[in-house]
Image (cartoon, rainbow, N blue to C red):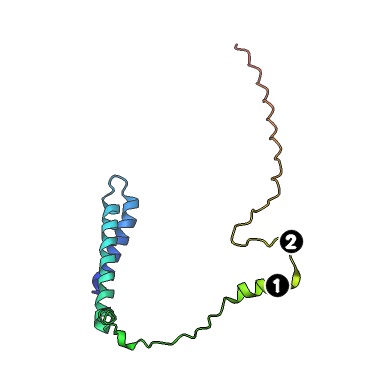
Amino acid sequence: MARVTYAALGFAFAALVGGFFIRASSVPLIASIALSAVVSVLILAGWTRRMRREGLGEDFERDEEVEVQDIEMVEVDEKVRVSAGAEARAKLKQKVGAKRPARDLTQEQPVIRPPAPKSKPKPKPKPKPKPKPKPKP
């Protein structure tokens, strides 16, 4: 299988190079694209065969059979702790005081950018003087 893949890859490369030298027809380039697709299919087929041989393909079917009995139930205490962030903010407000309103961090802050420098207009080129016509004899 590997020899067939390498042979098809070699022919695809030769057709690609030949397609740039033959300008009258695009058949070699099209053949190169087709052979490249064949090589891709052969590589995928080889990977699939290797996975089946190593037994990796069978594990996916076994994972679907999950038993519910393996899960243990845990009792929950009645005391529920509030998130530490909310408690800390409440205590901090009491200690520091409300001198200024708190920022809302959930909203996006506007980005302040300095104004772009104005570009100078390009000077127009001076017209070239026309040469004087030579007198005809």
Query: Which residue reaches farthest top?
Result: 137
Most foreground residue, 85 or 27: 85
Query: How busy is the neighbourhood of tag 2: few (under 14 within 10 Å), some, or many (20 plus)?
Result: few
Measured along the vertical axis of the image, is residue 88 above or below residue 133? below
Residue name at image x 34 percent, y 56 percent: 17
Q: Residue type at mark 1: give it.
A: Leu
Marking on residue 92: 1
Q: Quadrant of the C terminus?
A: top right
In this rendering, the count of numbered labels is 2
Of the numbered discs 1 and 2, the one sitting upstream in the chain is: 1
User: Horizontal and vertical percent for residue 83?
Assistant: 57, 75
Structural distance between the alpha carbons of marks 1 and 2: 13 Å
Measured along the vertical axis of the image, is residue 101 above or below residue 58? above
* Label 2 sits on residue: 100
Report whether 84 appears left or right of 102.
Answer: left
Q: Secondary structure at mark 1?
A: helix
Q: Residue type at mark 2: give it.
A: Arg
Q: Quadrant of residue 103?
A: bottom right
Q: Quadrant of residue 100?
A: bottom right
Query: How busy is the neighbourhood of tag 1: few (under 14 within 10 Å), some, or many (20 plus)?
Result: few
Q: Quadrant of residue 84?
A: bottom right
Report whether 3 appears left or right of 123.
Answer: left
User: Horizontal and vertical percent for residue 53?
Assistant: 24, 82
Most foreground residue, 12 or 97: 97
Residue name at image x 65 percent, y 53 percent: 111
User: Horizontal and vertical percent for residue 72?
Assistant: 37, 88
Residue name at image x 70 percent, y 40 percent: 119
Q: Secondary structure at mark 2?
A: loop
